[in-house]
Amino acid sequence: MKIHFSLLLFLTFSFLQAQEKVVLNGTITDATNNETLNGVNILFPDLGTGTVTNEYGFYSIKIPTGNHQIVVSYLGFASVKENISLTENTTLNFELLPSSEDLKEVVITEDVERLNISKPEMSVNKLEIQTIQKLPVVFGEVDIVKSLLLLPGVSNAGEASSGFNVRGGAADQNLILLDEATIYNASHLFGLFSVFNPDAIKNLKLYKGGIPANYGGRVSSVLDIYQKDGNSKKFSMNGGIGLISSRLLAEGPLKKDKSSFLIGGRSSYAHLFLKLADNPNSAYFYDLNTKISWHLNDRNNLLFSGYFGRDVFNISQSFENTYGNSVFNLRWNTVINKNMFSNLSLIYSDYYYGLTLDFVGFNWNSGIDNLNIKYDIDHYISDGLNLNYGLQTTFHEFNPGEIEPNSPSSGIIRSKLTKKYAVENALYFSAEKKFSEAISIQAGLRYSNFLRLGQDELNLYENGQPVIYNSKFGIYEKADPTGSFSLDKNKVERTFGNLEPRLAVAYTIDEDQSVKFSYNRMTQYLHLITNTSSPTPLDVWAPSGRYIEPQLLDQVAGGYFRNFLDQEYSLEVEAFYKNLKNRLDYIDGANLIANNAIEQVILPGKAQAYGLELLLRKNYGQFTGWLAYTWSRSEQKTPGRTDAEPGINNSNWYPTAYDKPHDLSLTVTYELSRKWDLNANLIYQTGLPTTYPTGQYRFENLTIPVYSPRNSNRLPSYHRLDLSATYTPKKKPNRQYKSSWNFGIYNVYNRKNAVSLSFRENEDTMVNEAVRLSIFGIVPSVTYNFKF
């Protein structure tokens, strides 16, 4: 009996020993500059498991003790294969060497840019900077936002328009983050360029749906961009010289392998050519990217990053418009223990808009300031269960505008619109669990809380209605305030709270194909007050409060994903539906500029968007690229508040200003030789909605047009072909200097795409005529890029 019992104990102990697991963690960096690498695959082929690094290059995984092969792979870098023996918890860091052969490949989604078939992540796209730098763009200026427009589900309001639209959402519904700081206007020169210097960017990720719980505050998408940390190995510089702008970036160690700096700048100079021609007008931009990184010890890193950008538009020295973003972020990364990683951030974000009118004699200033504190934890419970949780709080200060005289002779009286204040809080938790070889789930819950703080002179209205309906004339009008009151900004005027569940499920059919489903609810407490289809510098942000409810979105999406021919080709097909409540609409004749009672010209409505996206990619080889097609509809509806009111557009659904049923783009790269890469974009889109007059009548010598229902007409279809070629001279032995030339032609066949159509009476013939406004015809470009 004792022998049998001893044998049982021995077998039990042996079994437990065989099942014992330990934690393997570490950080993965670029061997040439110590940049941490996000999204690196750490695989164990014999175990059929693996993980990926987080935004800061950290990974953690629990695996059985014993001898295993580990494979570390990342696009653009040579893979590492090692045999390791694990008997206890171990920290193992890797430095990856860039692979010049891999850098020739253009792949647009995870691996790094190719989505993992079995991961419960969908409606997500990544673009590598190497890919973006090869794409043909107007004026040859590498542009991150313009590159996103080549992906399915992403569009904008036309040429030279700022912002972008995702799955039928408005441009202000996108959360744009640069090193975790909010960017409110992502464009330079009214939409010609984006504010992101590609030389300073490490990686970017666009979430169109299935948005994780750690993101919130917007209802359409999240564009998450991280700057480089800086080279802590050696000093280096790179930049580019173009026809209308140039850029330069320097980085290097403050203390080798311990700390580093990065500083980069861009500026346009086309306005200098105007001055040579005695033209007093000018329009230019400049921006600055900075970052300092300290490796305090094996468990702690400190990072400080910043961005400052300004646009200046000047006419005859009498009208000057200045606007731009300023952001700063101080971050502390900590490896708490073998399976927990934390990030604490203190973030400041500012958007400023200024206007000077010398011929009138005043300055106008407005903007929005944010101060944000956030704390996040990545918790790796086991090889099949990862947790992410945290909290954040943001203080908002809104300056709708203030006017002041700019000279002693000015007749302007100093005045300002009422400042507004709010605090936005969030607490979130998410878990990713692999239940079997076939099923993986990511589930999360976010609780958001918004405190509208007190302000001076908050209007009161009869029945709480700041907009009234005049049945006699059949129009909506401003209501007269019945009084007002003031409340100290340290007190809460109104409180909102919302639960925002998130869910994503992946079912793997086999190693090459899967189906996925996602659902997310999101809340947006800030509203962009504008009646244009894309953001402009003068746009004003307003918080939810007594008369403005927060926007609430529910989105569901489902998709089929497949790799074929040894992953050389891949296919992604997704369908989505979005339902939005409390989307603001504007009454006819609304005045939005310098309006101190914006609630008097807005009505709450609802919106919906639905569609089908297709992305077919060729990932490897001499010829690479992708075909993206989107069929979608985006509609808005503002019903009457009672049966006696007609609402907007007679309470009927009508297309939003950014509705594009068909959107097709073909992107191709061909490696002609070691020195030459050829690139092409072919784009076709349905024309944007607009409203045309259908007739007119005369009243006291005035011609009054009669318009069709809102957005019931469309501009002509949009299409163009872009070509570019990149020439990279053969590098001379033992020479650090590298260079390349990029030659491009934007809009090869000189298509005059309509930005707008206006109607007027011809002064000579007195006949009505339509006038098309186009921004670009054919635009050649050349850019010289260098690095040393």
Image (spheres, grey):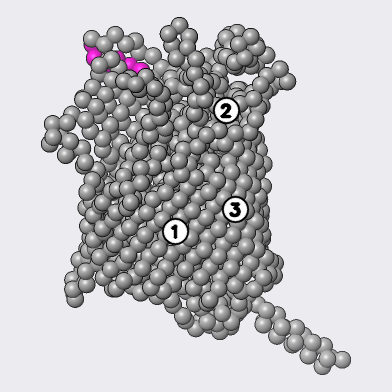
What segment is highlighted magenta in the picture?
A: 403-408
Q: Secondary structure at mark 3?
A: strand
**Circle 1: residue type:** Leu
The answer to which of 669 and 480 lies nearer the viewer is: 669
Q: Nearer the viewer, residue 778 or 208?
A: 778
The image shows residue 711, relative to residue 141, as above or below, that is: above
Q: Amino acid at mark 3?
A: Leu
Residue bearing mark 2: 709
Rendered position, 239 above or below 546: below
Circle 1 SS class: strand
Q: Is residue 258 visible?
A: no
Q: Is residue 325 visible?
A: yes
Residue type (three-letter) at the residue carrying disc 2? Pro
Outermost residue on the top side: it is 700
Quadrant of residue 385 in the image? bottom right
Q: Was residue 407 drawn as part of the magenta stretch in this picture?
A: yes
Is 683 magenta? The answer is no
Q: Earlier in the sequence, mark 3 or mark 1?
A: 3
Q: Is the Cβ of the residue at disc 3 closer than 8 Å to that at disc 1?
A: no
Tell me the SS state at disc 2. loop
Determine which residue is flagged by label 1.
666
Residue under the image location 43 percent in, 76 percent down: 79
Disc 2 or 1, which lies upstream in sequence? 1
Residue 636 in percent (x, y) is at 60, 34
**Closer to the observer: label 2 or label 1?**
2
Instruction: Using residue 271 as the reference point, say whether residue 429 is left or right of it.
Output: right
Residue placed under numbered mark 3 in the picture:
612
